[in-house]
Amino acid sequence: MAGKFVLKTATNGETYFRLQAGNGQVILKSEMYKTKASALAGVESVKNNAASDARYERKDAAGGQFMFNLKATNGQVIGTSELYKTEASRDAGIESVKNHAPSATSDDQTAPSHSA
């Protein structure tokens, strides 16, 4: 199964996205964006930068865990991983983003529901 970007609206009205692997696991999350258009631009930036290993900032997190950030060419963080227990699992998460992001579809869940 292919990956997908799921766009949602936060309780404060801002928009964010999550990149999910084909199995539904979240492999990358975005910051909050003031507008949906900005969030969609963030999705495109992830797609464009995901394949480049140089765009990944590998980090040690609290409690001996590991994580990574995906950065745009200007150095801005465009996506953050979940926490991993090992460096190997973090690196596998990076590979998953590289494999899923470029061809991922978008699932826009931001539209308000309308009742008839």
Image (spheres, rainbow, N blue to C red):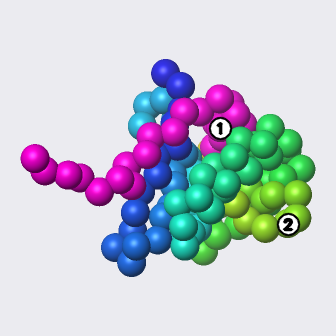
Q: Which residue is mark 1?
A: 101
Residue 99 percent location from the top left of the image? 68, 31
Was residue 27 drawn as part of the magenta stretch in this picture? no
Q: Work out whether residue 28 or residue 94 is closer to the camera in this orientation and state it.
A: 28
Q: Which residue is mark 2?
A: 75
Q: Is residue 33 above or below residue 67?
A: below
Q: Residue furthest front?
A: 116
Label 2 neighbourhood size at 10 Å, few (<14), some (14-19), many (20+)? Answer: few
| Distance CA(mark 2)–CA(mark 1) | 19 Å
- Amino acid type at mark 1: Ala
Residue extent of the magenta highlight: 93-116
Q: In the rendered structure, find residue 84 and report the number of the disc placed on it.
A: none
Residue 26 seen in this snapshot: no
Q: Work out whether residue 24 or residue 66 is closer to the camera in this orientation and state it.
A: 24
Was residue 106 drawn as part of the magenta stretch in this picture? yes
- Amino acid type at mark 2: Gly
* Disc 2 to disc 1: CB gap under 8 Å: no
Residue 71: name its quadrant: bottom right
Q: Work out whether residue 65 or residue 93 is closer to the camera in this orientation and state it.
A: 93
Residue 39 percent location from the top left of the image? 58, 59
Residue at screen point 65% across, 29% down: 103
Residue at screen point 48% across, 29% down: 22
**In the image: residue 47, left or right of residue 108:** right
